[in-house]
Image: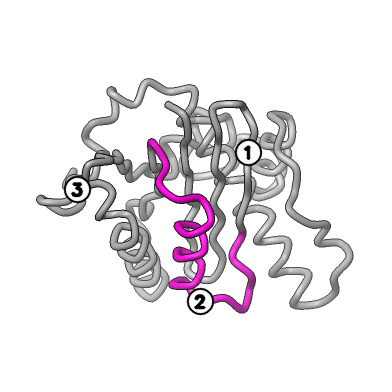
Amino acid sequence: MTSLLAIDLAPRFSAAILRAESGRWYSIVSPYDSSPERFVRKVRDAWGVPDVLLVEDVPPGMKNTSVMKAQYQMQGRVLEAFDPYAQGPEHVPIYLIRPHTWQKAMGVSDGRKSLNTKPYKEASQETAGERGWTAPFDYTEYHGKERQERRKSCGDSADAYLLSEWGLGTDLTHFEKFLYHPSAGPPHL
């Protein structure tokens, strides 16, 4: 594999990490004023076609229907943008990975709560930092609502980084049930 793209989806803020074979990594976080469509286009246009695409799936048991709807719409935009590559000569495998799958493996959460004494986003950023991730910006330089939004973006960037770490360290052939098949639609578990 020469490149792996991991996308952490959220209705308002999302983040993408591209991992190159050289070990280098590149990050794009959605600005708090960006539309989901612009974010997905920016990621696809900036990096082209990855060898493997990991997309964070909608967590099972989500109760807030408006958030769940936004998550599914965002996931649909990602699949729509990369679907031609999955069907075309590139045959890019697209995996829809449930959050608890990678969070538990990376030691951040057991799927219900943080495994650390810190709140989840702090634990996520700390774990990612220990593995080489650095925040895309210093959110402490901002104030009020903008500070909260930038802090959330940093957390999403850390999650995308940990998802990419999980993908690089995992034999994805064991996760065929999470593989998106363009002709059949999303996987049904």
Q: Which of the two residues, 26 or 181, is positioned nearer the viewer here?
A: 26
Asked if marks 2 and 1 touch (Cβ < 8 Å), the reply is no
State which quarter of the image contains the N terminus: top left
Residue 157, above or below 53: below
Spot occupied by residue 36 in the image (x, y as percentages of width and height): 47, 71
Residue 13, above or below 100: below
Asked if marks 1 and 3 touch (Cβ < 8 Å), the reply is no
Q: Residues within 10 Å of mark 2 (few under 14, many from 20)?
A: few
Which residue is at 37% across, 42% downward?
A: 97
State which quarter of the image contains the C terminus: top left
Q: Which residue is mark 3?
A: 87
Asked if marks 2 and 3 touch (Cβ < 8 Å), the reply is no
Q: Which of the two residues, 155 or 65, is positioned nearer the viewer here?
A: 155
Count of numbered circles in the view: 3
Q: Examine the image and state in which quarter residue 71 appears.
A: bottom left
Stretch in magenta: 29-51
What secondary structure is found at the residue carrying circle 3? helix
Which residue is at 47% across, 34% downward?
A: 3
Spatial distance from mark 1 to mark 3, Cα to Cα? 26 Å
**Tag 3: residue type?**
Gln
Q: Is residue 40 magenta?
A: yes
What secondary structure is found at the residue carrying circle 2? loop
| Mark seen at residue 35 | 2
**Tag 2: residue type?**
Ser
Q: Is residue 149 magenta?
A: no
Q: Which residue is mark 1?
A: 25
Of pointers 1 and 3, the one earlier in the residue sequence: 1
Name the mark nearer the viewer: 2 or 1. Answer: 1
